[in-house]
Amino acid sequence: MQSELRQDIRKVQDENEEMLRKVRASHEHYQKRQKQLFTGIGAMLLVFMLFALIMTIGSDFMSFLHVDILQKAIASKIRASEGFMTFVWYIAYGLPYIFAIGLFIGLYEWIRARFHD
């Protein structure tokens, strides 16, 4: 009877250890997913903030790089063009902003990869 009781106790201990191992693995998986979620939300927030910053001070930034002169020339081309070329000039007008946003996103990804634990 005592040996059966020991076997039952050992069986319960093994089951408890297995359950504890599964709970720890589940908790570790949860922590990884939570970290990915916060990283993703932080990245989206940063991209949005950089986009808003560029659009807010974009004219000053572009005049510092003398891109405003180019954009004024493109604006006059947009007024004078017709059809498909109008679409092309609109794309050319937005390229400096798209390039700046891409630069900030690339910089963020480089920093995130460099300091990733």
Image: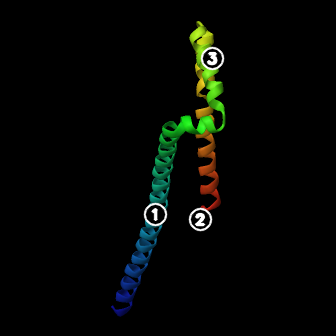
Q: Residue at x 63, y 36 (%)?
A: 99
Q: Secondary structure at mark 2?
A: loop
Q: 31 above or below 79?
A: below
Dot 2 and dot 3 residues touching (CB under 8 Å): no
What number is the disc on residue 88? 3
How far from the left and from the top, in percent, is residue 8? 36, 83
How far from the left and from the top, in percent, is residue 48? 47, 43
| Mark in front: 2 vs 3 | 3
What number is the disc on residue 31? 1
Q: Residue at x 50, y 36 (%)?
A: 55
Dot 3 and dot 1 residues touching (CB under 8 Å): no
3D distance between C-alphas at marks 2 and 1: 14 Å
From this viewpoint, which residue is outermost toward the bottom? 2
Q: 113 above or below 52?
A: below
Name the image quarter holding the N terminus.
Answer: bottom left
Q: Is residue 114 left or right of residue 26?
A: right
First-in-chain label (3 vs 1): 1
Q: Secondary structure at mark 3?
A: helix
